[in-house]
Image (spheres, grey):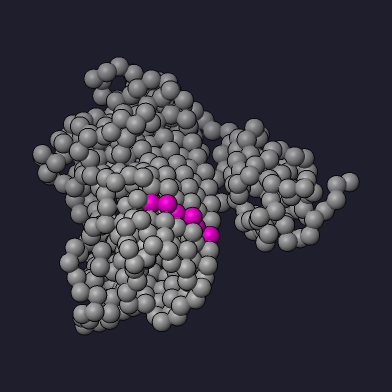
Amino acid sequence: MEPYLDTDLSPQNLLSPPASQTDTSIAILWDKSNNPIEVACYRIYVNGSIHGICRCTDYTITGLKPSHEYEVHVCTVSKSGVVSLPSATIKASTKPKAEIFDITAYGAVAVNETLNTAAIQAAIDACTFGGKVYVPEGTFVTGAIFLKSHMTLYVDKGGVLLGSDDPSDYPLMKYRWEGREQVCYASLVNTKDCDEGRLEGITIEGEGKIDANGTLLFKHEMAEKNGFRGRAVCLRSVDYIYLKDITVRQSPSWCVHLIYSNNISVNNVKIYTKSDEHGRRYKDVFNGDGLNPDSSSNVYIFNSMIASQDDCIAIKSGRDEEGRKVGIPSQNIRITNCAFKSGFGVAIGSEMSGDVRNVRVSDCTFEDVYSIATVKAPRGRGAVIENIRFEDCRLTNYSLEHEDCEWFRGAINIDQFYSHLLFDVDKAEEINDGTSIIMNIELKNLVMDTHAGNVIYLAGLPESPLQHIRLENIQAIGKYGHKAFNIKGLVMKNVFVQSREDENVKFHQVEHTDN
């Protein structure tokens, strides 16, 4: 019998996040113990036996049987090799074995210049409840395709869905674009609003690729200008979405856009919007966000990698009066164990007029990324951003492609003057429906080294100051140091900031400030 540690080292809050079960796998997440510094690894038990070990707080249990229920618990192993008391046990079930609908059986061929839209859509339309539309090895050129409820789109290893570069292959639709309902070109992979109500139970998985061919399509859509640019994947009004193991890349704008959707899991997904996997730059594309939950709730993003041209993850909820009228928040979002390789990190806003609340980002790495945390809500947006937590993250940025400007101010960047190059931090304006509130933001256990912009930039409005901002255990060096304007309730504990260029802030230590 192995000795047990104190319960303070037991994993907490074990769960299998929504939709994260396939016919052969179950994903699980948990919270670190109360004493994480002593943790060497975690053991994952399935039906009482060890299935595997890991050092992070997510694990995908593979090799399971379809239509089976499994009991799962997790134990911590300390650095001295002692095993903790187990977490609570959860039960989770795999899906039934899926009926396969191979797109080649419906006429799809992996031949250059052959458009496979009709064949792939025929496979989707034929797919039965719980079925799997299968994309085998090969590159299949297609225009817009439309998924339906209770199906899986499976792109196998070596398989590629490659978007056509002809705008006529993407019908015009009304989608949310930068916070407003507007006419857009359809995306490569879509859903349609339906008379029966909301869709549910959509999975996109496999080790293959969804490539929107954005470099060419961007040019053609911008030249034609019949609508705003499409995305690589745009799912709207869907409950229970699972994105697993897939690579999505080269979108003409935002890459993966999830609108009015709930109960979402994103597991081991790779997104490339700036360069491909080999570092070759996509030309001319802008608005290249990686993953955007938009007026969406109960979102779990874990074990994933995003190399972005713009925001890596941007959490949104509509823009200005229209966004406030729709009034659907983004909330209850957990981002853990992710790697960000370029772009602007995890952002909230600037379209956030339906509220954003309860966001947690932890145990993530940021490499040549400009900011760990950006919260942006310029005048006109209205609504509330609240209960946001960033913790246990590390940033190293040596890129100088962007420096201090109206779009980017710091490695920690909370900015209510976002998008304004010139502004007066002391000039108050009338409070109205467009006045935003930003409150209850906690940033803890962060290590940052950046050569671009400020280490910390906090700018509230004089008529609506930032409220209750807490910075704790932060070690950072940057081009510039720490700037703060218009804050009520700023607490800083064990914050060390060093500036490379600010003569008056070469080294700054703050234990506590409240103003």
> Is residue 368 part of the magenta span, yes or no?
no
- Rendered position, 154 above or below 353: above
Q: Position of residue 289 (x, y in %)?
A: 32, 47
On the question of residue 49 being in view, the answer is yes
> x%, y% of residue 400?
29, 46
Which residue does the image show at 61% across and 49% down from the upper left? 57
Q: Which residues are magenta?
A: 444-450
Q: Taking the image as drawn, is residue 241 in sight?
A: no
In this rendering, would 232 be left or right of 97?
A: left
Q: Main secondary structure of the magenta part?
A: strand
Residue 76 or residue 325, whichever sits in front? 76
Q: Position of residue 498 (x, y in %)?
A: 41, 60
* Residue depicted at 36% across the width and 38% down the height: 272
Q: In terms of image quadrants, where is residue 88?
A: bottom right
Q: Is residue 449 magenta?
A: yes
Q: Residue at x 41, y 73 (%)?
A: 439
Foreground: 137 or 128? 137
